Amino acid sequence: MKNIFIKMATITATSAALSVAIAAGANNPAQAIEFNFNWQGDAGYSAIGSFSYDEATAPKIISESGSGATNFLQSLNVSFLDPSKNLLGTYNTVSGGVSQSDFFAFNFDTSTQKLSGPFDVAGGTGVIGEYFFQGTIGDSLFLRQDIDQKSSFRTLDQNSGFIQVSKVPEPTSLLGLLAFGMLGVGSTLKKKQASC
């Protein structure tokens, strides 16, 4: 009998904690929204990355360029892989709302959730050998490597400008799924206790 009360108290406490967390999320929803992007070059090189911005303050078109504080973008990172899927490098082009690259260019339509126009992420911090992912969305995108930090680089791969973008699921929806699962566990325990 004592075990039943302990189990019921545990279930009640867990349900109460989840209810408070869900209510807090509903009253003060997370403002950050995150997207993943990936690119496949014609020769097999690829780029994978993500970016985020404040959903509550972002305009229809987010347009960022250059180094320093960004207007709306909170983060942007990208990793490059060779055709054998070996990691070539990872870059945090924007971190904490600050761009690290003088050459940074980014345009995103928040209503259609598509990138457009000039695009330049990754290198630009003055290190020989760093990678650049640049071009124009819908026209041509290039993966290049800097050779001398002056004007020489080599093009590793390119494509017709296609880049895929997908929204990352919000954590509050995962919390709701967890709460629903906990209700199922509680119901199962109640049924087992009733049959004892």
Image (cartoon, grey):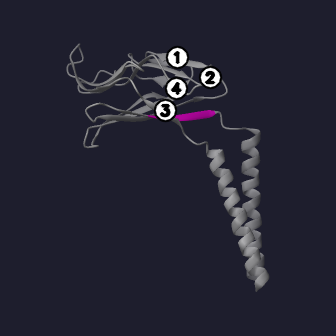
Describe residue 68's horizontal placement relative to residue 160 as left or right.
Answer: right
Placement of the C terminus among the 4 image quadrants: bottom right
Instruction: Using the rendered view, name the quadrant where residue 18 is placed.
Output: bottom right
The numbered mark, 2 or 1, whose residue comes first in the sequence reads 2
| Residues under numbered marks 2 and 1 in contact, where contact means CB atoms less than 8 Å apart | no
Please report the residue visible at 61 percent of the width from the left and 19 percent of the height from the top: 60
Q: Which residue is mark 3?
A: 165
Compute the Cα span from label 4 to label 1.
12 Å
Q: Which residue is mark 4?
A: 114
The numbered mark, 1 or 3, whose residue comes first in the sequence reads 1
Placement of the N terminus among the 4 image quadrants: bottom right
Residue type beneath disc 4: Lys
Please state the extent of the stretch shown in magenta in the rendering: 32-37
Camera-side residue of 76 and 183: 183
Residue type beneath disc 1: Ser
The numbered mark, 2 or 4, whose residue comes first in the sequence reads 2
Q: Which residue is mark 1?
A: 63
